[in-house]
Amino acid sequence: MKQNGSGKFLVFTIAFALVLMLMVSLLGACTQQQTPAPATTPVAQPSTAAPQPSTGAPQPTTTAPQPTGKPVTIVFSSHDPKGGSWAEIYDPFFAAVEQRTNGMVKFEQHWGGELSGFFEAYDNTANRTFDMAQVMTSMYPNLFPLEDVTSIVKYDVKNLAVSQTITELATKFPEMGQAYEKSGTHLLWRVATFPNMSCMGKGKAVKTVDDLKGKKYLSTGPWDAAMWTALGMTPLSMMPDETFLNLQTGVVDGATFTLASLFDFGWGEVVPFITETNVRCGAFQCVMNLDVWNSLSPEFQQIITEEAAKIPKAQDQQQLRFDRDLRPVATEEFGTEFFKFTDADYAKMNELTASVHEKFKADLNAKGLPGTAILEEWLSLSKKYSAPEYALK
């Protein structure tokens, strides 16, 4: 009996174990069916958050936020030659904006006056013949009377950061910026070419202030012309593409140039004599059609504004570097001779042009503009930015 009882118990135990294993297996299968795998891989949705400036710290490997707004191509025009000295300023700006907008803002570049003459560039931007241009607003004194303050200088002051000087001046006189909006454009930045020098044609060397008298001289704007007239010269105006021939043939004796322009336009071939006269800068502006600017998303506007804010300082350092590096090159390539006025010459130039300073203030004051205030501030800032700390880094 004991053996039969033990056999039955063993059979029962094995059967029970098999049933229990089957139940566990069925329960596991039911559990897996309650948690199905996804049919497809989820697609990441683009973020609409505004991009944050880089801190330089390592960033997590996540999907980069995409700028909002529609893709846009901005047509840009300049009278300067493609690949000239201005490319060093504009190319990094174009590249940075395109990179930061992930290609949503692109620039279609036209150089060498391909779309417009220099004198018409501002009007053609305002009426949207194209979207954006490099201009010189001193050609439009009725629209921008305050901008022409840069034509008035103290010759004994050598400003080392003229673009930053003009930019700071404009923050103190908002009327300067308002003139752009009123005439149909949005100002992106102001810059200057400097140090400008008196570049004279063959047989027209200027070694002292007295040598200026009677010379026919290229000028830009009414106040620049007034300064040269006070120094005994005859100011003339002409198109940039006429300058080479007019210097070569003696129609004009000299002009105010930077060293870079001698190479950009080949003018070094026809102006063998250069005198450091500490004359006015060449003030340039970059503007965008106002409707085009307003059509951009706030995010695109912010990116463009942030990149534009870097331009004045970069321009100033570039101009100082050109002045240092291109002197020996000009002498080697063109046979250029350099002269420098004495302190006594600069003092005499200040004396001769003092009446122009007073007339500038009086004329603008009479029009209800801050003529006295803006000229005094301009001269004060020019002195500030002549300090050694602003020299070439």
Image (cartoon, rainbow, N blue to C red):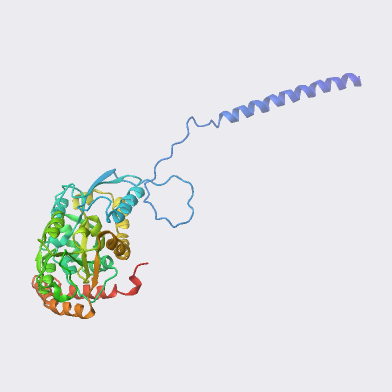
Residue visible at 38% across and 51% down?
51
What is the tally of numbered marks visible in this picture?
0
Image quarter of residue 268: bottom left
> Compared with residue 129, is residue 200 higher up or lower down, i.e. above or below?
below
**3 and 94: which is toward the camera:** 94
Residue 22 in view: yes
**Residue 83 location (% of width, % of height):** 28, 51
Q: Is residue 189 visible?
A: no
Instruction: Classify 281 as above or below 95.
Output: below
Quadrant position of residue 102: top left
| Foreground of the two, 305 or 3 | 305
Q: Residue at x 33, y 46 (%)?
A: 68
Observer-nearest of 387 and 26: 387
x and y, in percent, of residue 119 in the image: 13, 55
Percent position of residue 376, x then y: 20, 76
The percent coordinates of residue 253 (x first, y second) are: 13, 64
Q: Is residue 389 left or right of residue 149?
A: right
Check the picture and name the quadrant holding the N terminus: top right
Which quadrant of the rendered structure holds the C terminus? bottom left
Q: Nearer the viewer, residue 267 or 160?
A: 267
